[in-house]
Image (cartoon, coloured by chain):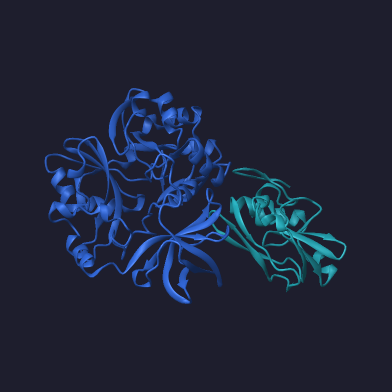
């Protein structure tokens, strides 16, 4: 089990720690998941996301390596920008991992895979695993900039999907305008030794500590995929509605052939949102039916604190021809729950964007 | 006796009886009021939905009474004693969080007319249940 540099802080706050992707991380603090969720939607929350991997790829060949190994086209961005991208399985175009790349400097990239996928990503892109040297703190919500401004003013102005350096407590740090909540916010990668001081400063400035429970309900409302649920073996970016992650214009890349074949043949299923008629959470693995016939399966489900209804993401068979507004039933432990198909995301922040 | 957990001491009132499945039962004449314990609600986390039984249904001891769903899991509620459901707590439909905030009071789940009033005496007392939750 790996431990976050912030574990002492989490314990002092009364966090419930759980194993996640090989790490011991906070599920929730004493206020609970709903309080943390609403804090993030209404003002500002801070998450320890040190379990995300960091693989540093640098040198004159770094750009070409990433262009070849990852699906998105780095030419759409540039140094000082972040990009969401996938590592694909060349056999079937399915998603080995979804990744954020921080283009830190001309020949330097911080590739950030999911906790448990660091090894296959590193095997593909090379580089050095720097995960153990740093912590990553995500400050998210409409009040995120206010809190960051109070603690590290140089980090507060970073644009959405931009990357910048800043100094905290004399240590060189990196900030990106990224997150996983559907809210405005930043993620700060900082040397492990200054992480406790930064965490405590964010909390003192008013950010509510939030755990993996709220992170999951927030990303679900925002319609953001989670590897192992909406992405993974057998699931391609096209099925997940993430065609924009595929750099069709950049020439060959790992998995291109399989994706081209799928694009040619047409995707057999597509990710959609489902909203239940009541509060009952939709749940992963539940069968989705239309007039009695199976048309798909729920990949993630829970209660939406904002909509106060059960919601879920589901793969729906393209052949079923379902569109937003169509009624379906979701089988939950032997009972059929009425739900409607909806476009993603479920909740969109007032400023626009997901 | 209170147990120290991450989010504070867990309450186990002396005047209730308990099942090993973390339900409590309060005998009121020929009926028992049933709910889930403070230990159970704390372990579940934020409760967002409760599937209540239908009144008039008869359940055996250990039979399925309903389900409690939190943001992280689904948990079944079992009848601590056999009986017929005579009342359900309709307030839980819109405010399931009462199970978290007041598990022994406003967060009660249902009432059963017990088949055998003596069956309640076969349940754990507060000391026995406290011991169970600290094992």
x%, y% of residue A10?
Answer: 50, 38
The residue nearer to you, when weighing A270 against A11, is A270
Which chain can be seen in cyan?
B
Above or below, A76 relative to A150:
below
Q: What count of labels does the image hold? A: 0
Q: Which chain is blue?
A: A
Q: Residue A1: x and y, percent? A: 41, 49
Q: Residue at x 37, y 24 (%)?
A: A153
Q: Give the side of residue A29 with respect to residue A222, left or right.
A: right
The picture places residue B135, in percent across and down from the top left corner, at: 64, 55
Q: Is residue B124 left or right of residue B77?
A: right
Q: Residue at left 31%, top 53%?
A: A117
* Residue positioned most to the right: B29
Q: Residue furthest bottom?
A: A292
Taking the image as drawn, is residue A220 in sight?
A: yes
Residue A214 in picture, x, y percent from top left? 49, 46
Locate residue A132: give its quadrant.
top left
């Amino acid at each position: 089990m790996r431990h976050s540099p912030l574990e002492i802080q989490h314990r002092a706050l009364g966090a419930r720690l759980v194993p996640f992707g090989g790490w011991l991380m906070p599920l929730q603090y004493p206020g609970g998941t709903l309080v943390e969720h609403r804090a993030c939607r209404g003002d500002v929350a801070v998450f320890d996301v040190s379990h995300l991997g960091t693989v540093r790829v640098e040198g004159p060949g770094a750009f070409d390596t990433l262009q070849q190994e990852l699906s998105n086209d780095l030419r759409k961005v540039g140094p000082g920008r972040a990009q969401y991208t996938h590592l694909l399985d060349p056999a079937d175009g399915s998603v080995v991992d979804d990744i954020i790349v921080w283009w830190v400097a001309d020949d330097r990239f911080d590739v950030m895979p999911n906790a448990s996928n660091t090894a296959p990503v590193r095997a593909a892109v090379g580089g050095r695993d720097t995960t153990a040297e740093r912590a990553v703190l995500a400050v998210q919500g409409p009040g995120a900039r206010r809190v960051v401004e109070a603690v590290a003013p140089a980090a507060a102005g970073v644009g959405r999907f931009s990357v910048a350096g800043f100094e905290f407590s004399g240590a060189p740090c990196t900030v990106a305008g990224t997150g996983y909540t559907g809210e405005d916010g930043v993620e700060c990668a900082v040397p492990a030794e200054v992480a406790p001081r930064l965490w405590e400063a964010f909390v003192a400035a008013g950010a509510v500590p939030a755990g993996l429970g709220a992170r999951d309900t927030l990303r679900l409302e925002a319609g953001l995929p989670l590897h192992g649920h909406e992405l993974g073996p057998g699931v391609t970016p096209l099925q997940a509605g993430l065609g924009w992650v595929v750099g069709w214009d950049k020439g060959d890349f790992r998995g291109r052939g399989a994706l081209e074949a799928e694009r040619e043949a047409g995707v057999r299923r597509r990710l959609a949102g489902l909203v239940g008629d009541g509060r009952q959470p939709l749940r992963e693995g539940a069968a989705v039916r239309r007039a009695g016939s199976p048309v798909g399966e729920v990949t993630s489900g829970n209660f939406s604190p904002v909509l106060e209804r059960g919601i879920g993401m589901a793969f729906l068979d393209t052949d079923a021809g379902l569109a937003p507004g169509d009624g379906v039933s979701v089988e939950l432990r032997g009972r059929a729950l009425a739900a409607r198909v909806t476009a993603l995301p479920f909740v969109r922040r007032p400023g626009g964007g997901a | 006796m209170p147990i120290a957990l991450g989010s504070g001491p867990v309450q186990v009132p002396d005047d209730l009886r308990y099942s090993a499945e973390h339900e409590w039962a309060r005998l009121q004449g020929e009926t028992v009021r049933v709910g889930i314990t403070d230990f159970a609600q704390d372990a579940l986390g934020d409760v967002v939905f409760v599937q209540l039984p239908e009144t008039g249904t008869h359940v055996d001891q250990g039979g399925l009474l309903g389900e409690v769903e939190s943001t992280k899991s689904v948990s079944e509620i079992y009848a601590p004693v056999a009986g017929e459901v005579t009342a359900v707590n309709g307030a839980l439909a819109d405010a399931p969080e009462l199970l978290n905030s007041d598990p022994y009071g406003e967060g009660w789940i249902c009432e059963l007319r017990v088949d055998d009033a003596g069956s309640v005496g076969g349940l754990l007392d507060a000391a026995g249940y406290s011991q169970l939750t600290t094992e």
